Image: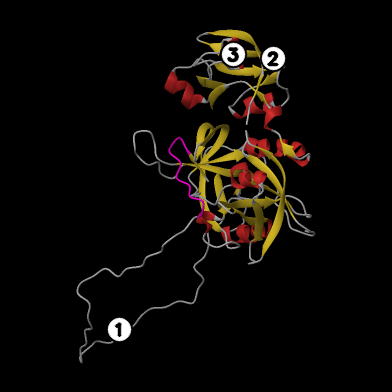
Amino acid sequence: MRNANGAARRNNRISLLLVAALVGGAAGHFASSNSPTVNFQTSNASPGAAVLASGLSVPQLVKKVEPSIVSVNVSSSVGGDQGTGMIISSNGLVLTNNHVISSAVQGAKITVTRSGTTTALSATLIGTDPSDDVALIRIDNAHGLPTVTFGDSNKLVVGDTLIAIGNALGLSAGTPTVTMGIVSALGRTVTATSGTNSETLHSMIQTDAAINPGNSGGPLLDSRGHVIGMNTAVAGTLPDGSNAQNIGFAIPISRVHSLIAGLLKGGVLANARAFLGVEIISNDPTVAQTYGLGITYGAVVVVVDSGTAADIAGLQEGDIITNIGGYAVATGQDVQKALAHFRPGSHVKITLYRGSGVTTLTATLGMKGL
């Protein structure tokens, strides 16, 4: 799991020391020959479980999805990493984050452990996209495996119920951690760091479902148990030294899905991705009212990276993008969806609101490097 907008704190191996303590007065035994009799009320009823909007209880949802989740371990002579993966084909194709398996490009060994088992299975790296932090691996000699079901991340709204499942903290491979929360925000842009590496991820889902190191690459589920995101980053230490609380980020599954065909071809895909060079947030009535914007839709430009296609074309902070190359932009997520239709070097018209007027600019899309 990457830290977002803060210093990286990832070790090669995750270790926990669980300490239990009894708090009270001086140790000793107390006895009385006149101890009163106490009658306790007891019940054999099950505790019960939260029922989701789909009609499934949380335990039912977990039982349904867990068989298609794996713990991922990457090891080499100099260390390793741990994460989570989602089985997407019966013959063992597994999606995870690129940063979980990045050392495998240099020959580190990948193994996976299916939920409910203790056997580490060897796996092979198929393809990676460092720019989007997505990778595809395959469990060796696999067949007949259960798979996850993709949901529609474009239909998410703030407040929707979410469930996260993953190998949190690497506590025990094969026994994933389950947490629950809601969609806290949509269309977030975050800069995630890991060691000396840094990446900017766009159109992310923000959630308060607890995700931790080891959750990376695992599913963020809707109330039906459908995958609507890939857990990727968690907010850590902020520039002022304060610590963020309950803020995690997931890549929308619509974006991940669009990358699978390329990942299946093998190798590294990042060099072929068209790049505009802006950081954005989704516009909505709340954002528009807060910042005094003239419209309540589109993608608001908050940063223009120097020297990029956006900078050269003349985009400015505060511009509200509504169309890219003929593709409507109603939210921040729509920017990446529109760019996915073009290659580096493409000339695209960008329609935007600036102040009280409409402007059209032409940008020559660049290429995102590794």
Indicate which disc residue 352 carries: 3
- 48 in the magenta segment: no
Q: Nearer the viewer, residue 111 or 262?
A: 111
Q: Residues within 10 Å of mark 2 (few under 14, many from 20)?
A: some
Q: Position of residue 30 (x, y in %)?
A: 21, 84
Which residue is identified by label 1?
38
Magenta part mainly helix, strand or loop? loop
Q: Position of residue 180 (x, y in %)?
A: 52, 52
Rendered residue at 55%/17% (across/down): 320
- The first of marks 1 and 3 along the sequence is 1
Is residue 282 in view?
no
Q: Nearer the viewer, residue 183 or 367?
A: 367
| Amino acid type, label 3 | Leu
Instruction: Determine the image quadrant of residue 155.
Output: top right
Indicate which disc residue 348 carries: 2
Q: Position of residue 144 (x, y in %)?
A: 79, 60
Cα distance in 3D space between marks 2 and 1: 79 Å
Q: Considering the image in quadrants, where does the C terminus appear?
A: top right
Q: Is residue 215 left or right of residue 328?
A: left
Q: Nearer the viewer, mark 2 or mark 1?
A: 2
Q: Nearer the viewer, mark 1 or mark 3?
A: 3
The colour scheme of the drawn protein is secondary structure
Cα distance in 3D space between marks 2 and 3: 13 Å
Against 333, residue 222 (above or below) is below
Against 342, residue 5 (above or below) is below
Is residue 358 in view?
yes
Q: Position of residue 233 (x, y in %)?
A: 52, 42
| Amino acid type, label 2 | Val
